[in-house]
Image (tube, rainbow, N blue to C red):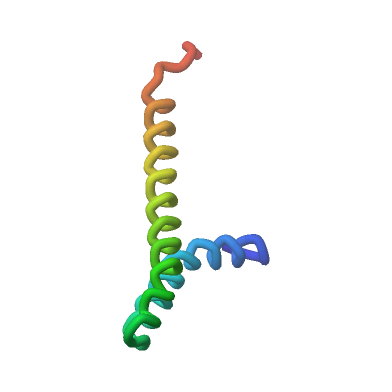
């Protein structure tokens, strides 16, 4: 990762795990009914992480299928 484009990609890759960590820290620090306010951030972070993992798996499966297809004779 070099340059501003690589930096922004790295920051985006870390955004959902950092959102989850931030939500868990806030969950530990809050008490009573205020703890419910953390739930949306936690769910969004988990959802983004899950979506990223599923789409990565789908892309890899499609790439493997494309590599296994016989190509035209050279």
- The residue drawn where x is 41% and y is 56% is 47
- The residue drawn where x is 38% and y is 60% is 46
Quadrant housing the N terminus: bottom right
| Number of dots carrying numbers | 0
Please say if 48 is above or below 25.
above
- The residue drawn where x is 60% and y is 67% is 7
User: Which of 44 and 71 lies nearest the eye of the viewer?
Assistant: 44
Q: Position of residue 24 (x, y in %)?
A: 35, 77
Quick one: which residue is furthest to the top in this view?
73
User: Which of 32 and 54 lies nearest the eye of the viewer?
Assistant: 32
Q: Position of residue 43 (x, y in %)?
A: 40, 62
Please say if 57 is above or below 69.
below
- Examine the image and state in which quarter residue 38 appears: bottom left
User: Which of 31 and 9 lies nearest the eye of the viewer?
Assistant: 31
Q: Position of residue 58 (x, y in %)?
A: 40, 38
- The residue drawn where x is 37% and y is 86% is 30
Q: Is residue 2 left or right of residue 45?
A: right
Please say if 18 is above or below 32.
above
- Examine the image and state in which quarter residue 49 appears: bottom left
- Examine the image and state in which quarter residue 2 appears: bottom right
């Amino acid at each position: 990762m070099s340059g501003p484009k690589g930096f922004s990609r790295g920051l985006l890759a870390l955004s959902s795990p950092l959102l989850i960590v931030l939500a868990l820290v806030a969950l530990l620090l809050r008490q009573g009914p205020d703890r419910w306010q953390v739930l949306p951030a936690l769910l969004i972070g988990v959802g983004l992480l899950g979506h990223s993992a599923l789409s990565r798996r789908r892309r890899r499966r499609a790439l493997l299928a494309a590599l296994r297809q016989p190509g035209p004779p050279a």
